[in-house]
Image (spheres, helix red, strand yellow):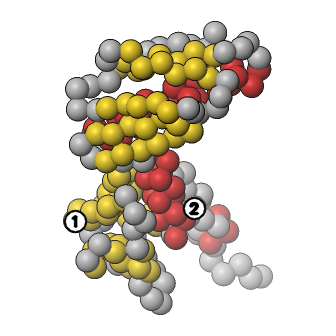
Amino acid sequence: MSRVGIKPIPINSQVKVTLKDNLVTVAGPLGVLSQIINPGIKVEIKQQEVVITRKEENRMLKSLHGLSRSLIANMIYGVSQGWQKRLEIQGVGYRANLNDKNLVLSVGFSHQVEIEPPEGIEFAVNDTREIVVSGIDKVLVGNVAAKIRKIRPPDAYKGKGIRYQGEVVKTKPGKAGKVGAAGGGA
């Protein structure tokens, strides 16, 4: 039995969950999300909770049981409170700004990088060093944050670049031959 899949998902009073065939739709104060669930997974909406069970006991459905529960739980959380990913910028002269809704990054290139947010995503910049990516879809928020990080990932030697908040970047030591060498020649 799936440890995650058997837990019922509580529904708060602001959220409405509907089921039509295999399409689960969740509506809340921040928006509406939909997800198609595998036909071998049974979704039941009871009073203030959603219960997910398997129709058969096979390996594939066992793996999809917990996944389906997590997807629905993430949709309920997203439409009621929203998801956020925070990114930090480290490096001399590296900064971020907002131009209307677009994110403008100055991260050591000869040009500025401008990123237009996809539908359902909002950018916020705190203090030119912190970027906040927010939205109702957890997967979309994570993908957009990963694309921003990919523009200038942290450097292995100095640690400069864009990283997730709280991410630990191990730095490599520089060349050992330079330290204390006096020109080396006799």
Considering only vertical position in the picture, is 89 above or below 14?
A: below
Horizontal side of residue 135 vs 43, given as left or right: left
The residue under label 1 is 127
Question: Nearer the viewer's eye, disc 1 or disc 2?
Answer: 1
Q: Secondary structure at mark 1?
A: loop
**Which residue reaches farthest top?**
1
Choose top left, top right, bottom left or bottom right for residue 123. bottom left
Considering only vertical position in the picture, is 166 above or below 133?
A: above
> Which of the two residues, 106 or 72, is positioned nearer the viewer here?
72
Considering only vertical position in the picture, is 146 above or below 83?
A: below
Question: Is residue 92 at all visible to an observer of this figure?
Answer: no
Q: Residue at x 47, y 90 (%)?
A: 110
Please provide percent x and percent y for residue 90: 39, 65
User: What quarter of the picture does the C terminus occupy?
Assistant: bottom right
Q: Residues within 10 Å of mark 1 (few under 14, many from 20)?
A: few
Q: Residues under labels 1 and 2: Cα distance?
A: 25 Å
Q: Residues within 10 Å of mark 2 (few under 14, many from 20)?
A: some
Horizontal side of residue 4 vs 39, given as left or right: left
Going by the numbered disc 1, the residue's amino acid type is Asp
Q: Residue at x 24, y 42 (%)?
A: 29
Q: Secondary structure at mark 2?
A: loop
> Which of the two residues, 86 or 160, is positioned nearer the viewer here?
86
Going by the numbered disc 2, the residue's amino acid type is Ala
Q: Residue at x 57, y 39 (%)?
A: 36
User: What quarter of the picture does the N terminus occupy?
Assistant: top right
Choose top left, top right, bottom left or bottom right for residue 107. bottom left
> Which of the two residues, 136 or 106, is positioned nearer the viewer here?
136
The residue under label 2 is 156
Where residue 170 is drawn, which disc sits there?
none
Q: Earlier in the sequence, mark 1 or mark 2?
A: 1
Please provide percent x and percent y for residue 114: 41, 79
